[in-house]
Image (spheres, rainbow, N blue to C red):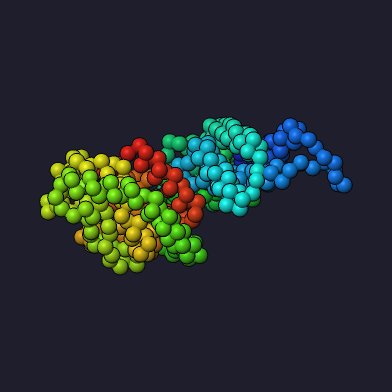
């Protein structure tokens, strides 16, 4: 290892002390607090009369204190949420700044209203504008300047898996980083046989704090899919979902469904009326589907097809003649899924999870798709990671890729991944993309 350059530790991006400070999330939080929380409070204090106290100068009213403390909490939650979301595959952090800050500040005003606390609206409004401006600029620059850059060890599966265009891949010709631009990490197939000097090189990277990723791990981190080869390679147990979050998620599902049903009742009634006037047959479609722990359950949906018309067992790509006029509209807007809120209340489904398949399709996939039934280790959902990333899939090849997305969701089962799915689902509903 003596042949490697002494400056190898500086081959990692953000290795210099000043760069670490600039990239530090804690420093970002502290600086943001000064701009977004303290500055509006001081500005508001300057517009009002200050009164001296025994320990210095204080804001003149409880309303200003409530605003300062509240905006501090809202800003902290906003930054935490954006930082956690930005770690997930395919996210551009600056796109989530505005919706996240809006949600957090609305939650702040709701909490202040519930507890009947007076607060300075001017101070909160100024803090909100500064938070949006500062965070959007920071994350926009960070996203566009910092394109991920990895060095690839040319053995095993690594070269084949490192192909995504949004990442800059630098294939190594020899076991060193001489003359190479600074990188975010090294990707290698750690199960492949490689010469001893390459093994020494990977060890030296670790010593100098250059991250070394297994090829399938890097592929998973970038694509949001867990390759089925991972499961063949004794990784099956790594997909066990977190049981503590499973309990919390069940209570959140129940509470959200209980709140949404009264709010969406007028929309559901109008949808039911439109279906009744459009074509004969029942308003609600019921179908047995494979559910949690492979237990069958009856799913509820608004009927979007002509009653009694037989088909292939799944929605055909293009113009399926079985779909009614109203059905085409409610499918595009996802209104046909609303009755599944009752499935959520019953515990058959979750708001977010792998989409449940019909019993016939489940039996078919079980024969042709490896590990298909493992997706039932969590409750099926109204929407899910595979739906927002890939969309509808019925053929075996499409289902295999969809299953890889489902496995990623199970492996990274968390509140933040669920939040990302919710945000992307809202975007899909608004755009109408991916419907059949």
Q: Residue 36, image x and y in percent? A: 66, 37
What residue appears at the point 57 percent right and 52 percent down from the top-left corner? 114
What residue appears at the point 46 percent right and 47 percent down from the top-left corner? 420
- The residue furthest right is 54
State the image quarter where residue 403 is shown: bottom left
Q: Residue 232, image x and y in percent? A: 37, 60
Q: Quadrant of the C terminus?
A: top left
Can residue 336 be seen in this snapshot?
no
Count of marks overlaid on the render: 0
Q: Residue 98, image x and y in percent? A: 52, 37
Can residue 282 be seen in this snapshot?
yes
What residue appears at the point 43 percent right and 48 percent down from the top-left corner? 421
- The residue furthest left is 309
The answer to which of 181 and 434 lies nearer the viewer is 434
The answer to which of 216 and 330 lies nearer the viewer is 330
What residue appears at the point 28 percent right and 59 percent down from the top-left corner? 299
Task: From this view, report whether residue 283 is shown above or below residue 37.
Answer: below
State the image quarter where residue 16 is shown: top right
Question: Left of 1 or right of it: where is 400?
Answer: left
Q: Residue 241, image x and y in percent? A: 45, 62
């Amino acid at each position: 290892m003596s042949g490697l350059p002494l400056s190898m530790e500086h081959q990692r991006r953000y290795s210099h002390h000043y760069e670490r400070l600039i990239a530090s999330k804690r420093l970002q939080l502290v600086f943001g607090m000064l701009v977004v929380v303290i500055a509006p409070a001081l500005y508001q204090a300057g517009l009002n009369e200050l009164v001296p106290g025994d320990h210095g100068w204080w804001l003149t009213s409880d309303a200003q204190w409530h605003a300062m403390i509240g905006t501090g909490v809202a800003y902290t939650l906003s930054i935490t949420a954006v930082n956690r979301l930005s770690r997930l595959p395919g996210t551009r952090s600056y796109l989530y700044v505005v919706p996240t800050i809006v949600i957090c500040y609305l939650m702040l005003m709701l909490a202040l209203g519930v507890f009947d606390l007076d607060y300075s609206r001017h101070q909160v409004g100024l803090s909100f504008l500064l938070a949006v401006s500062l965070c959007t600029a920071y994350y926009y620059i960070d996203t566009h300047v910092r394109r991920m850059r990895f060095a690839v060890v040319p053995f095993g599966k690594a070269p084949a898996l490192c192909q995504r265009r949004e990442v800059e891949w630098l294939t190594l010709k020899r076991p060193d980083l001489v003359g190479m631009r600074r990188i975010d990490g090294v990707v290698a197939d750690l199960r492949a046989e490689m010469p001893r000097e390459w093994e020494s090189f990977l060890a030296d990277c670790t010593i100098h704090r250059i991250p070394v990723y297994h090829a399938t791990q890097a592929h998973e981190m970038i694509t949001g899919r867990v390759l089925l080869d991972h499961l063949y390679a004794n990784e099956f147990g790594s997909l066990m979902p977190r049981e503590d979050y499973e309990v919390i998620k069940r209570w959140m599902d129940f509470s959200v469904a209980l709140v949404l049903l009264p709010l969406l009742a007028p929309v559901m009634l109008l949808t039911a009326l439109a279906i009744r006037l459009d074509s004969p047959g029942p308003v609600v479609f019921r179908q047995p589907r494979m559910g949690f722990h492979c237990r069958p359950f009856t799913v509820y949906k608004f009927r979007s097809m002509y009653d009694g018309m037989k088909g292939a067992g799944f929605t055909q790509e293009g113009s399926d003649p079985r779909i009614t006029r109203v059905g085409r509209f409610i499918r595009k807007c996802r209104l046909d899924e609303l009755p599944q809120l009752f499935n959520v209340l019953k515990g058959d489904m979750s708001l977010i999870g792998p989409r449940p398949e019909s019993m016939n399709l489940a039996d078919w996939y079980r024969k042709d798709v490896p590990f298909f039934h493992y997706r039932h280790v969590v409750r099926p959902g109204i929407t899910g990671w595979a739906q927002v990333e890939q969309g509808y899939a019925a053929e075996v090849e499409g289902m295999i890729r969809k299953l890889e997305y489902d496995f990623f969701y199970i492996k990274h089962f968390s509140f933040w991944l669920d939040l990302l799915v919710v945000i992307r689902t809202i975007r899909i509903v608004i755009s109408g993309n991916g419907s059949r």
